[in-house]
Image (cartoon, grey):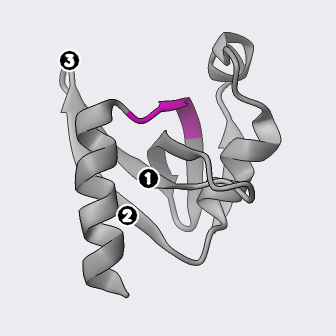
Amino acid sequence: MGYEWLTEALARLRDIESQEVTQVLSAERRLPLAAESAGVHFLTISGRTGTGRPLVVAVRLLGGHRQQIIGAREMTPDELVRFKAWEADAS
């Protein structure tokens, strides 16, 4: 799966390094969920960085095996609770 950055998304990263986003996207265990905002369909990928930091990365499907990274952020407390439950069930 090939990922490319939306230039604006890379510029908007705050307190998250681009390599952390890459780590989440290439993690062995990640949780993809379909999402929509303002009529735009995308995926959120929840996962952990190499150091265990839980992040949510948003990607837009471009076609074929290409996806565009459109954002990344830390999980909210509620998202983290759900993600931990998913991790426990997936073990």
Whole-angstrom CA distance, mark 3 to mark 1, is: 19 Å
Circles 3, 1 touching at the beta carbon (< 8 Å):
no
Residue 25 quadrant: bottom right
Contact (Cβ within 8 Å) of mark 3 with mark 2: no
Label ID, residue 31: 2
Q: Earlier in the sequence, mark 3 or mark 2?
A: 2
Mark 1 falls on what kind of element? strand
Closer to the chain start, of discs 3 and 1, is: 3
User: In the rendered structure, which segment of residues is drawn in magenta?
Assistant: 69-75
Residue drawn at x 72%, y 51% as measured from the top left = 22
Distance, label 2 to label 1, CA atoms, is 5 Å
Which label number is shown at residue 38?
Answer: 3
* Amino acid type of the residue that numbered disc 1 sits on in the rendered structure: Ile
Relative image position of residue 73 (x, y in whole percent): 51, 28
Asked if marks 2 and 1 touch (Cβ < 8 Å), the reply is yes
Q: Residue at x 26, y 49 (%)?
A: 81
Q: Residues within 10 Å of mark 2 (few under 14, many from 20)?
A: some
**Viewer-nearest residue: 19 or 82:** 82
Decide whether residue 11 is among the magenta residues: no
Residue 82 lies, with reference to residue 58, above or below; the image says: below
State which mark lies toward you, 3 or 2. Answer: 2
| Side of 80 where 21 appears, left or right | right
Q: Looking at the picture, how far across and down is residue 9, in whole percent?
A: 62, 21
Tell me where residue 33 appears, x and y as whole percent. 27, 55
How far apart marks 3 and 2 lie (CA) works out to 22 Å
